[in-house]
């Protein structure tokens, strides 16, 4: 899926800088200031978005470290005991999440990119020298998987208004529920 | 098994070796090869920077000084909106027009950005518009700057033509597709829409296009093969992530190329939105956007004009009107009657696959690459219309389910 915030934000910033900002009334100081702040904010988002997941994972890791250290030092009355027990439960839950959050979003994207390419190369090669039955099976698999893929992609961009009949497309939030 | 390691290709900074390999892999018309090669060669050179009316007027001044005899004056330059691919500036020229004398002429500069959603030749566009004068309603041509000698990028200058692309006040989405003219206007435009297409396809282009930048393919499969090579090459040049459905479509298209029995001039983007019409008499006053024109099979234009994405339902909610004009069967029948040429539905379906493939290449491949490099004057529009690429792929998938 190529319609991603990184590319969309770059286009928004360019439009703001090249077209919108020069057209903002120079006498309207608040509009001038907010147009520039909007650009600066978007530029900040572009810088930080790729780091967001890593930042959160690092923070979770550090909080788990702090929490474990606190648990070894938390001794006292009933209130401290109850709070420590609660903290231990949170540590267990957080540790489980951290365990499942090993790969970076960029790695995930990269793995999809490579699989798309090698799948594409197989299709191209199959049209060159695959056995007829094999080619028919490959064609069937690609068409079937394309249906599912396009359902996802059309659901992703549904609110942009390009579907001639939007009611036949399931919103992506529903498609990705429980995935 | 050892995996063959490949050197990753940086499409944002294409190497000369990679460019040469693409040129070898995809034989196409020399002029198309020139513009695509130029695009790749210049790609690493940076993004598009806004060009103001003053700067554009200065370029125009330089061109006119070289081309126009006597004193002249450029008046009232303004931007023209419309289209997602080229910049257009309207102006008036006070000049001594050869054979006429002192006159004020309304004109348009049409210039490329650094890269465009569709990379094409201003030279071809200029030559064809000039050749079609008197054949179809087209804007009159004046001068061309096909290599960007005067303007920052290649440009042409043609006459301004009065007219609208859609009814005044009508709302359409940013893509400009699926225009609804309304029933009374539709009844007047539809016969012209068909008649002009028939006229174009019957046009005897031979002498007029002699020595032009249009190459002539042989009859048979070569016209289609050149088109496949063109758009397969563009996908290789611009596409980001691979799309299995597009690979499948291309392989199928190569395996099933139809035989062309007659070479016609093909508009390549024949649709509502690419013609102007006068609102007071609903007369088509000019056909625009000839940049995708080439010599090929008439079924190409017929298929493109009848793509689902370009049409809409009539007021009854049941009858689908191709290009907002008429039902597909009536469109093909009217064309056969107007041209005396046959329409083969199998070929129409083939070119439906081709055009859905081409649209996906343009929207998701070139659109993506242009935005990624900040290459146009309206990247935001391109980033928005990329989304249309998915519903077009769905159309492609459905047609392939039927024919493949």
Image (cartoon, coloured by chain):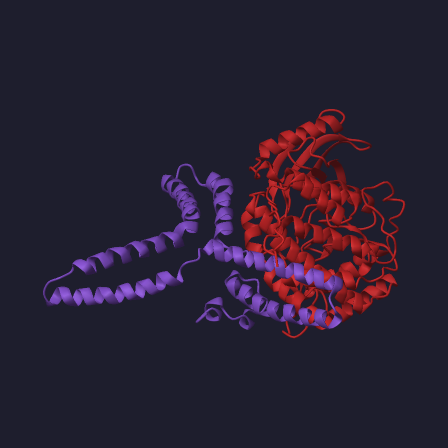
Chain colours: A purple, B red
Q: Residue furthest front?
A: B1
Picture coordinates of residue B282 (x, y %)?
71, 57
Above or below, B47 against A111 in this view is above
Q: Quadrant of the C terminus of chain B?
A: bottom right
**Where residue A137 appears, x then y in whole percent?**
68, 72
Q: Considering depth in this image, is B193 or B295 the residue closer to the camera?
A: B295
Q: Locate residue B241: give its quadrant.
A: bottom right
Nearest the camera: B165 or B213?
A: B213
Q: Residue at x 77, y 70 (%)?
A: B330
Q: Position of residue A20 (x, y in %)?
A: 48, 43
Residue B206 in sight here: yes
Residue found farthest to the top = B70
Q: Quadrant of the N terminus of chain B?
A: bottom right
Q: Give the residue displayed 54% in from the left and 72% down from the top.
A: A167
Residue B305 in which image quadrant: bottom right
Q: Is residue A122 left or right of residue A177?
A: right
Q: Position of residue B135 (x, y in %)?
A: 83, 50
Residue at image position (66%, 57%) is B359
* Left or right placement of residue B236 versus residue A103 in this view: right
Q: Is residue B232 left or right of residue B44?
A: right
> Total label count?
0
The residue that appears at 46% across and 41% down in the rendered structure is A21
Closest to the observer: B73 or B197?
A: B197
Foreground pick, B206 / A171: A171
Residue B139 visible in the displayed image: no
């Amino acid at each position: 899926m190529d319609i991603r915030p990184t590319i969309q934000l770059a286009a928004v910033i360019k439009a703001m800088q090249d077209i919108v900002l020069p057209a903002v009334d120079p006498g309207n100081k608040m509009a001038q200031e907010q147009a520039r702040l909007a650009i600066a904010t978007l530029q900040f988002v572009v810088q930080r978005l790729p780091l967001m997941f890593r930042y959160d994972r690092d923070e979770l890791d550090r909080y788990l470290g702090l929490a474990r250290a606190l648990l070894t030092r938390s001794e006292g009355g009933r209130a401290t005991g109850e709070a420590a027990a609660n903290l231990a439960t949170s540590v267990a839950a957080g540790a489980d999440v951290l365990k499942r959050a090993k790969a970076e979003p960029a790695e995930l994207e990269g793995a999809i990119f490579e699989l798309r390419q090698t799948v594409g190369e197989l299709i191209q090669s199959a049209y060159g020298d695959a056995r007829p039955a094999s080619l028919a099976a490959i064609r069937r698999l690609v068409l079937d998987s394309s249906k599912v893929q396009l359902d996802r992609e059309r659901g992703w961009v549904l609110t942009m208004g390009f579907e001639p009949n939007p009611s036949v497309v399931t919103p992506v939030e529903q498609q990705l529920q429980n995935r | 098994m050892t995996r063959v390691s490949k050197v990753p290709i940086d499409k944002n900074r294409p190497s000369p070796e990679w460019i040469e390999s693409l040129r070898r892999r995809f034989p196409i018309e020399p002029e198309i090869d020139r513009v695509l090669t130029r695009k790749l060669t210049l790609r690493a050179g940076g993004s598009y920077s806004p060009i103001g009316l003053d700067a554009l007027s200065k370029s125009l001044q330089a061109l006119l000084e070289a081309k126009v005899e006597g004193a002249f004056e450029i008046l009232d330059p303004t931007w023209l909106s419309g289209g997602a691919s080229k910049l257009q500036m309207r102006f008036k020229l006070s000049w001594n027009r050869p054979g006429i004398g002192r006159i004020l002429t309304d004109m348009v500069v049409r210039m490329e950005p650094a890269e465009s959603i569709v990379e094409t030749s201003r030279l071809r566009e200029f030559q064809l518009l000039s050749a079609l004068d008197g054949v179809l309603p087209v804007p009159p041509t004046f001068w061309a700057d096909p290599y960007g000698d005067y303007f920052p990028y290649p440009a042409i200058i043609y006459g301004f033509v009065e007219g609208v692309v859609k009814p005044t006040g009508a709302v359409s989405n940013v893509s400009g597709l699926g225009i609804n003219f309304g029933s009374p206007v539709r009844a007047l435009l539809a016969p012209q829409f068909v008649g002009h297409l028939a006229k174009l396809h019957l046009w005897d282009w031979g002498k007029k296009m002699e020595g032009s930048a249009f190459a002539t393919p042989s009859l048979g499969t070569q016209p289609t093969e050149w088109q496949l090579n063109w758009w397969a090459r563009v996908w290789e040049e611009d596409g980001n992530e691979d799309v299995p459905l597009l690979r499948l479509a291309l392989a199928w298209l190569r395996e099933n190329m139809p035989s062309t029995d007659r070479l016609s001039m093909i508009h390549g983007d024949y649709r509502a939105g690419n013609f102007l019409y006068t609102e007071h008499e609903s007369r088509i006053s000019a056909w625009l956007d000839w940049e995708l024109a080439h010599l090929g099979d008439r079924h190409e234009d017929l298929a493109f004009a009848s793509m689902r994405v370009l049409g809409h339902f009539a007021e009854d909610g049941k009858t689908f009107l191709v290009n907002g004009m008429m039902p597909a069967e009536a469109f093909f029948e009217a064309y056969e009657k107007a041209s005396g040429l046959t329409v083969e539905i199998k070929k129409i379906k083939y070119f439906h696959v081709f055009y859905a493939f081409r649209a996906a290449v343009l929207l998701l491949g070139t659109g993506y690459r242009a935005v990624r490099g900040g290459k146009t004057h309206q990247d935001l529009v391109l980033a928005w219309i990329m989304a249309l690429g998915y519903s077009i792929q769905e159309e492609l998938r459905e047609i392939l389910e039927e024919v493949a």
